[in-house]
Image (cartoon, grey):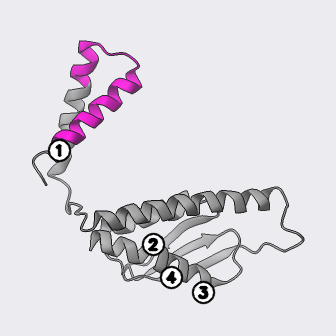
Amino acid sequence: MNDRKPWFLVAGLTLTWLLLAERMTPGQLLIGAGVSLLMVFGFRAVRPVHPRLRRPRSALRLLGRVAIDILRSNLNVGRIVLGLTRGREIHSGFVEIPLELRDPHGLATLAAIITSTPGTVWANLSGDGATLTIHVLDLADEKVWIEIIKQRYERLLMEVFE
């Protein structure tokens, strides 16, 4: 890990502590800095794999895609909840998606993306990590969902982490 990055993390965690404490006293600053130092440097030794961002531009593209998809999904789920489906039946179900992504940080990011997007939930990852199962609220075509996950997310996650 770069020598400066842990100190940025310590500073960020200390600032978060102070914001949560809602006061800036020397005692709170000392406690926040102490807890932050313990967290950053104490947990560093037990982390088996450290993340490495290989292509930051791909990460920014992914962030943009996720933001747009979350907005679209909010609108679509809102229509379903309000019954604005124009008589179309809604069928939910599970989709199994073959994965090439193996990096644990990439998989964790994919889990966060899928779960934070309304209408989808990460349900399972096979023991060998080769198959992801998601639940989709409005499942019209499994192939479309496989393509979305693989092309919109997995490909970029592999660029970023592998």
The secondary structure type at the circle numbered 1 is: helix
Q: Earlier in the sequence, mark 3 or mark 1?
A: 1
Q: Main secondary structure of the magenta part?
A: helix
**Residue that numbered label 4 is attached to:** 97
Q: Earlier in the sequence, mark 2 or mark 3?
A: 3
Callout 4, which amino acid?
Answer: Ile
Q: CA distance from mark 4 to mark 2?
A: 12 Å
Q: Residues within 10 Å of mark 1 (few under 14, many from 20)?
A: some
Q: Which residues are magenta?
A: 7-31
Q: Earlier in the sequence, mark 1 or mark 2?
A: 1
Which residue lies at the image location 28% right of the left edge and 36% below the top edge?
12
Callout 1, which amino acid?
Answer: Pro
69 to the left or right of 139: left
Numbered badge on residue 6: 1
Q: Nearer the viewer, residue 129 or 111?
A: 111
The secondary structure type at the circle numbered 4 is: strand
The quadrant holding residue 68 is bottom right
